């Protein structure tokens, strides 16, 4: 009997132990053990803009300044080399620049003749011959008027010099005859001392006549081919660049050419209005050489802000020599009035629509052009700034990405959007 009880107790304990083991196994399956690990060491911070740990110790602002500095130095060196190269071949660059300006001015006329179904060569030839005839006729009229009026102007200049001498004696200076004669002798001595330099300048000018003639021929030929084959020449230049930049470059070139044409036509219109206003004032006041002076004002207006003022000062000086102080002051008032109309009405209304350039940029550009290339530099500076402004803006603007399947390369190699 006791043995039976002992067996039952052992069986009971074994069953309870198996139940506890099964329950513990179920709990372990529902809640897995969590492995606790020591935290790893924080990763080292890496500077993406540096090549070594030493560079990382340099302040960020100093690294950025150094990066800008060496890049600006490289750009400056390249610009200096380019300017030196242009100065060496200036006999070629200057005629090409003038030809570009003339082509931008005459391109609409060639376009009109092409719309009339004329051959490109014939249309370009007719426009070029018409422009040459207009320039030759204007120069002939200016030279004839100048030759006819030069003796009278010389007499008036001599009389004006005598008046200045009398004013120096009887005016507020109260100079004696000896002091006046001494001043005249000093001026004569200076002229005699610098005669050799003036003669050398004349000889150098005579020596450059061949270069001047060659430059004029180059202007004519370049203008003809720019007008006839300008689009083909530009496409050839664009094809020298990688395919993925050709469309952007072509678009920037077209926009820059449109800006140059608008600038040249606006400048011609403003110059014509300036010359007409000052020329009418000279005719009314009976100042000699009204047409040559108006032509000078017209040419001077191609240098914005400065050119028309300088040419107007020549008109005032001639009025002073020929007509006296009163007429000279009236001419000065007319020149100032025309300049105010140009600065406040014509420039914003006409030129502002063609190119939007701040007057300070114009002044700095003209001054830099004069320092680098003289009169030609002053003439080319502003249109060059306008073209670069348009081209850089067009290249820098954001464009929507074109899907690869939409780009088709034509037989000529130019990319086209389907």
Image: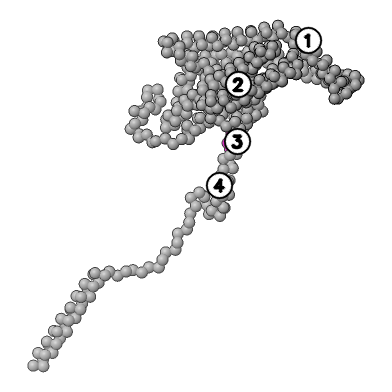
Q: Residue at x 57, y 32 (%)?
A: 358
Whole-angstrom CA distance, mark 1 to mark 2, is 33 Å
Return the x and y of residue 263 as percentages of the image width and height.
Answer: 54, 23
Q: Residue at x 56, y 52 (%)?
A: 59
Q: Quadrant of the N terminus?
A: bottom left
Q: Secondary structure at mark 4?
A: helix
Disc 3 vs disc 1: which is toward the camera?
Answer: 1
Q: Which residues are magenta?
A: 74-78
Q: 18 left or right of 117?
A: left
Return the x and y of residue 348 as percentages of the image width and height.
Answer: 55, 27
Query: In the rendered structure, are the residues bearing label 3 and label 4 in contact, judged by CB atoms less than 8 Å apart?
Result: no
84 or 108, which lies in front? 108
Disc 2 vs disc 4: which is toward the camera?
Answer: 2
Return the x and y of residue 309 as percentages of the image width and height.
Answer: 66, 23
Whole-angstrom CA distance, mark 4 to mark 1, is 69 Å
**Residue 76 magenta:** yes
Q: Which residue is mark 3?
A: 76
The disc at residue 74 is none
Q: Quadrant of residue 369?
A: top right
Res. 364 visible in picture: yes
């Amino acid at each position: 009997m006791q043995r039976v009880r002992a067996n039952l107790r052992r069986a009971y304990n074994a069953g309870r132990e198996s139940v506890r083991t099964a329950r513990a196994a179920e709990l372990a399956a529902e809640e897995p053990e969590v492995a606790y690990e020591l935290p790893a060491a924080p990763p080292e911070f890496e500077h993406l803009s540096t090549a070594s740990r030493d560079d990382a110790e340099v302040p960020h602002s100093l690294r950025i300044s150094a990066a800008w500095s060496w890049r600006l130095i490289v750009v400056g060196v390249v610009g200096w080399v380019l300017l030196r190269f242009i100065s060496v071949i200036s006999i070629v660059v200057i005629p090409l620049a003038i030809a570009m300006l003339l082509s931008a001015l005459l391109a609409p006329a060639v376009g009109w003749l092409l719309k009339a179904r004329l051959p490109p060569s014939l249309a370009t030839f007719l426009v070029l011959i018409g422009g040459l005839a207009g320039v030759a006729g204007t120069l002939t009229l200016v030279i004839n008027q100048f030759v006819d009026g030069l003796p009278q102007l010389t007499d008036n200049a001599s009389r004006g010099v005598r008046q200045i001498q009398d004013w120096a004696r009887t005016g507020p200076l109260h100079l004696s005859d000896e002091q006046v004669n001494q001043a005249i002798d000093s001026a004569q001595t200076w002229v005699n001392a610098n005669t050799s330099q003036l003669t050398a300048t004349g000889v150098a000018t005579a020596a450059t006549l061949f270069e001047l003639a060659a430059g004029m021929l180059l202007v004519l030929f370049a203008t003809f081919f720019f007008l006839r084959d300008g689009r083909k020449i530009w496409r050839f230049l664009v094809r020298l660049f990688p395919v993925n930049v050709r469309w952007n470059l072509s678009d920037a070139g077209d926009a820059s050419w449109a800006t140059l044409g608008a600038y040249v036509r606006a400048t011609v219109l403003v110059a014509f209005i300036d010359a007409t206003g000052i020329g009418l004032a000279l005719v009314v006041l009976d100042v000699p050489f009204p047409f040559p002076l108006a032509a000078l004002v017209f040419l001077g207006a191609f240098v914005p802000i400065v050119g028309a003022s300088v040419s107007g000062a020549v008109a005032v000086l001639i009025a002073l020599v020929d007509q006296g102080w009163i007429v000279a002051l009236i001419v000065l008032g007319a020149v100032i009035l025309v300049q105010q109309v140009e600065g406040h009405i014509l420039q914003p209304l006409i030129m502002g629509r063609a190119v939007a350039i701040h007057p300070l940029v114009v002044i700095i550009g003209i001054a830099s052009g004069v320092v680098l290339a003289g009169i030609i530099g002053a003439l080319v500076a502003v249109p060059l700034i306008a073209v670069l402004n348009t081209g850089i803006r067009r290249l820098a603007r954001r464009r929507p990405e074109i899907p690869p399947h939409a780009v088709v390369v034509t037989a000529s190699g130019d990319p086209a959007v389907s």
